[in-house]
Amino acid sequence: MVKFFKLLLDDIDGPMARDPAARSRIEVVFCYPGFHAIVAYRIANMFWRNKFFLLGRFTSHVGRVLTGIEVHRGATIGKRVFVDQGMGVV
């Protein structure tokens, strides 16, 4: 669980490092759909890796509906990913 939160902090730092418009971490958490998509992916991927395929697929679907960004639940994504202008990105 600690690893999950460390990844989330790294994912917040991604936009902070790469987007000059990002003014604070709290802004990234509340206002960046790319960050929301990555959070949904991290949760869906956790389900997928633990063989809860339906929950992984459903979580991935909910993330896509909420953000417009689809990240496959089985994909491998590293740290500090930044998705900018993500509507419709697959």
Image (spheres, grey):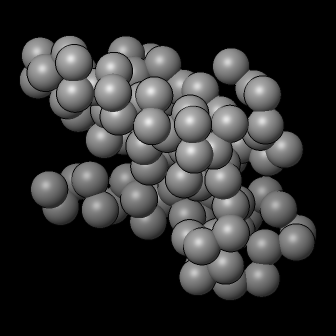
Q: Residue at x 49, y 39 (%)?
A: 63
Residue 38, position as x, y percentages in the image:
51, 44
Residue 49 vs 36, above or below: the answer is: above
**Residue 88 is at least partly visible in this image:** yes
Q: Is residue 81 above or below residue 8?
A: above
Left or right, 85 with reference to 6:
right
Quarter where residue 8 is shown: bottom left
Q: Quadrant of residue 12?
A: bottom right
- Give residue 7's position: percent from left, percent from top: 38, 54
Residue at point 45%, 28% (across, down): 61
Depicted 20 relative to depicted 57: above or below? below
Note whether residue 49 is visible: no
Tell which of 53 and 81 is nearer to you: 53
Q: Is 63 or 4 nearer to us in this picture?
A: 63
Query: Which one is nearer the viewer's eye here, 8 or 60?
Result: 60
Image quadrant holding the N terminus, namely bottom left
Q: 38 or 59, which is in the foreground?
A: 59
Placement of 12 over or under 46, stated as above or below: below
Q: Quadrant of the C terminus?
A: top right
Left or right, 65 with respect to 89, comes to left
